[in-house]
Image: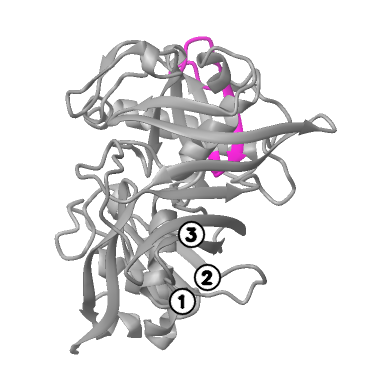
Amino acid sequence: MAQIQIPATYMRGGTSKGVFFRLEDLPEGARVPGPARDRLFQRVIGSPDPYGAQIDGMGGATSSTSKCVIVSPSARPGHDVDYLYGQVSIDSDFVDWSGNCGNLSTAAGAFAIHAGYVEAGADGVRTVHIWQANIGKTIIANVPVSGSAVQETGEFELDGVTFPAAEIVLEFLDPADDEGAMFPTGNVVDELEVPEDLVAGGRLKATLINAGIPTIFVDAEAIGHTGTELREAINGDAAVLARFEALRTIGALKMGLIKTPQEAARRQHTPKIAFVASPVDHRTSSGKEVLAGEIDVLVRALSMGKLHHAMMGTASVAIAAAAAVPGTLVNLAAGGGQRNTVTFGHPSGTLRVGAEASQVGGKWNVTKAIMSRSARILMEGRVRVPAAILAGSTA
């Protein structure tokens, strides 16, 4: 069978890349959730690939580059577009729809204007109201425009991205779940029961938070790390990765996100697991030296089973929210007390994120988290895939 051509845009958003589609441009069978959509996105990206390279697709063989996005006009009052995100597994046969990508939220705002869903208007900053369909939350993207188009070039620098670009400010509104359970267990710190071959003593303190994305924070020292590790030190050690996945599974069960340990393998995107430490002088993956006094806390996070090269946008929201609440492991590593901003160190550099937290009726909640990112189109045109995949074949 011949290949089909689908209009698509390849975009960078923050420290991630993904293939963006307008809903109306997708083949009819892929306009609704289901196997046809999953097969299409897998073939676009080049998965599942037992070689782990995604050579026959648009993916870049990392969790940061194995992503697809659908944007469409929103019927929800007060919103311009709906944004749906799919995290495509690299070597396994599934697409994870359980959470958002904070980095590509930046590109979703810009794409809404590129795609003609939101008028660029006069030079300045265009506010795009985004409905994040995976998690049912509102994101506001403040996108610079110039000459009746998105302004993509600029002087804003983002650690983890080589070249400067125009700054896009993101606001994540009410980033916890709909019930307001930012801490699913009701505790800012829980003590998890874990096998002694994972952690000496069989007990591990953790902050389990649902803000931006469900995240499990643990203390770096408690699991034998420093918080200054770079990607190669973690991702090159299969035993260490297996231990993190085991701890992530235990945390996911405690958070009520899965019912059995076996479910974790099909839910790789959420929750995230991250480890934190107090600031020390260290070097980033680019060789830049970061002094302890330049940051509040060190954070390393894993995504899809591997240490992230920088920091996921949604995890950045979780970091800011946890830092804002006294007593969490993130807050304690940052020096304690209540704060509305935090600057954290990640493998590629540093990032400053703000969060507004308050306690009502004994429960903590975050009304807004704010961060700056950038986005730009890398390529646009048509992506080609074998027509057979829409008929259920893996050809």
Return the residue found at the far left: 55
Tell me which numbered mark, 1 or 3, is placed earlier along the sequence: 3
Asked which secondary structure carries label 2, the reply is strand
Q: Residue at x 51, y 15 (%)?
A: 333
Q: Residue at x 39, y 63 (%)?
A: 110
Return the x and y of residue 391 as percentages of the image width and height. 34, 85
**Which residue does the numbered mark 1 point to in the structure image?**
117
Q: Which amino acid type is shown beneath numbered disc 1?
A: Tyr
Label 1, label 3: how far apart the Cα atoms are: 23 Å
Tell me, for residue 321, which label it has, or none: none
Q: Which amino acid type is shown beneath numbered disc 2?
A: Val
In contact (CB < 8 Å): disc 3 and disc 2 = no
Return the residue found at the far right: 361
In contact (CB < 8 Å): disc 2 and disc 1 = yes
CA neighbours of label 2 inside 10 A, class few (<14), some (14 to 19), many (20+): many
Of the 4 image quadrants, the one containing the N terminus is bottom left
Q: Residue at x 38, y 63 (%)?
A: 145
User: What segment is highlighted magenta in the picture?
Assistant: 194-214
**Which residue does the numbered mark 2 point to in the structure image?**
81
Asked which secondary structure carries label 1, the reply is loop
Q: Is residue 240 visible?
A: yes
Depicted 143 relative to depicted 381: above or below? above
Asked which secondary structure carries label 3, the reply is loop
Q: Which amino acid type is shown beneath numbered disc 3?
A: Trp
**Which residue does the numbered mark 3 point to in the structure image?**
97
Of the 4 image quadrants, the one containing the C terminus is bottom left
Return the x and y of residue 236 as percentages of the image width and height. 21, 30
Label 3, label 2: how far apart the Cα atoms are: 18 Å
The answer to whether residue 247 is magenta is no
Depicted 185 relative to depicted 74: above or below? above
The answer to whether residue 197 is magenta is yes
Tell me which numbered mark, 3 or 2, is placed earlier along the sequence: 2
